[in-house]
Amino acid sequence: MLFLLATPAWGQGFFSLSEEQEIELGRQAAEEIEKKYPILQDANVNAYIERLGQKLVAESGRTSIDYHFKVVDSADVNAFALPGGWIYVNRGLIEAADQENELAGVLAHEIGHVVGRHSAEQVKKLQVTSIGLGVLDAILGRGTSGQIAGLAGQFVASGIFMKYGRDAEREADRLGVQNLYDAGFDPRGMVTFFEKLAALRQEKPNAIETFFSTHPSPQERAENVSDLIDSFPQSSNLIRTSGDFALAKRWIDRLPPPAGVPSEADETSAPTPAQTGSSYRGEERDRQIAAAFAPLFQVGVTADPRYDVPTRFDFDGDWRADNNWRAADQPGFDPQASVYYALSETETHLFIHYSLFFPVDDPRIFDRRARSHENDFETCLVFVEKDGENGQSGRVVLVETLESSRVMKYVPSASLRGGFESIEVQQGHPRLFVDPNGHAIRAFRGDETRELRYVRDVMSYSYTGRSESPLARRGGSNVGYDLVPLYSLWTQAGQSDNEIYAATADLGRITINTRDYRGRPSDRSVQLGQVGVNFRSESRYDQGGAAPWGREIESESARGEWFLNPAASVRRHLNLNDDFSITFLHQPYLGVFR
Ligand code: ZN
């Protein structure tokens, strides 16, 4: 180990954990793990996993210690090993396995980490990064149980038990596949499970993200073990699956959903906006998809172009709503371009709301200060037909905008039909125009400066991942905008007392179709109740604008539907039949996550 040579005071032998120390460390780390994660308490399932594990242990390269196998009641696909033989497998992983040799392959891999004593390496890393030399000395030499407990605590808190190095993973795979074969299992289970993981990564990236961040790619792992598999003598009676395995799967099937997975019946777990955090699982993926279809906005400009720059609600450094106009009136006001996004997804389609925020709506040109208002929010909906599971490729089918309380519907010219207007879509990016008189969003025609006499100029905005100031750029040159999640404004909309919302509305109960964590049809019903809809505003101005979920829209069956249940809304607007799926895979605003 090179880093040891660089620190000559620490001789290599110094770091060797004795077997007793390793076991004690593992025992205490297991206690920490079981405080932190829910352990499945089903006697049948536990007995099964213990039996399967011990069957493998008997053929492993390290039988001198006791092994313990437990199931973590989590839907995520993962497994891990602690020092000294404590092995945990997530319920989600058992559910993802279709044959016993796949599950056995994972257990054998984890046993491989114990056989290879990989945790001793991890302890060294922990030592180097966070605890003092004296402490390690005490633990390894004359260590008391209390000191080992401290080390075990850090071991678990650092998450290092899930981050074995690449070489350790490779060795665990090779030891594991050998163990699998020696215990009588068809070793190809390991490869088929790797393939399953790769497929699952496309389908449910979040459920499997920890696993992928801590293990080499399945392709690489399959390559690593397949030459070994080829070298094994052919045998006709290798085990692929068993009745025991099928039974264990059935037991799991009948259990209540794992912790953290909302159940239909459990109403108190519904995330009203106040209860949810300010970011959510999968936000980064949503941002990437929103970027792929981010509209090109042509924003009309009046006398003072600063009032027509879409920016962040907290552009002035705070989340107070009723000082935004004042902040925009400051001489140094130099807004940076940003666009809000919110994404929901069904099996076949994406629904991406893009919202533009302006601190002031229409204050100068018309001299109608009384009719102007602070905090203007304008939203459009881009409806995309997915091309496979990768959300970033697909076809824009429809773009909807709001013209006061009416929904305007635009379709790409090629699929133009009665009742719709056409919109230009450039490589997935719809071209929209923003009218400075009220900031309403429409399809861009190109003749706006001629038709609308108050439009002095048109600024082009496109997504670049950077918020740029448009003030220096007049006449045609493009301004880059960044995407920011609407979610933070949504989470504050559920709080009764805040500086953002002036008025709440009862959005009642909203129910959408979804699937439960096993993939079965299910309803998600959320009692939203009073939710912030209109922004606060300084009293001398008119009432502030409304958030996208607070707009009152003629064609909605309930307030908030266009934003929260866009599948139902679009199905009606496009007159689609029952073949059109309104089953959400992802709607973070109602607690449904991929
Ligand atoms: Zn591993």
Image (cartoon, rainbow, N blue to C red):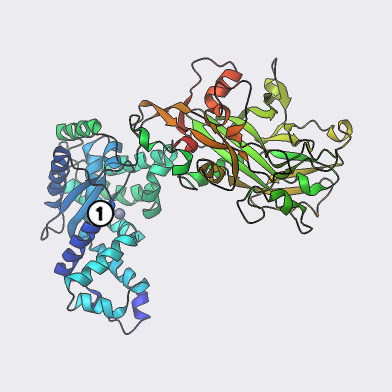
Q: Nearer the viewer, residue 431 or 506?
A: 506
| Helix, strand or loop under label 1 | helix
Give above or below for 577 relative to 285: above
Occupied quadrant, residue 434 = top right
The percent coordinates of residue 283 (x first, y second) are 50, 45
577 sits left or right of 45 in the view: right
Give above or below for 82 relative to 313: below
What amino acid is labelled 1 in the image? Answer: Lys
Q: Residue at x 74, y 46 (%)?
A: 309
Question: Where's the C terminus, which quadrant?
Answer: top left
57 sits left or right of 431 in the view: left
Q: Residue at x 22, y 78 (%)?
A: 138
* Residue extending farthest bottom: 9
Q: Nearer the viewer, residue 176 or 482?
A: 482
Residue 95 seen in this snapshot: yes
Q: Quadrant of ligand 1?
A: bottom left
The percent coordinates of residue 398 (x first, y second) are 64, 26
Residue 392 seen in this snapshot: no
149 sits left or right of 523 in the view: left
**Mark 1 highlights which residue?**
35
Q: How many marks?
A: 1
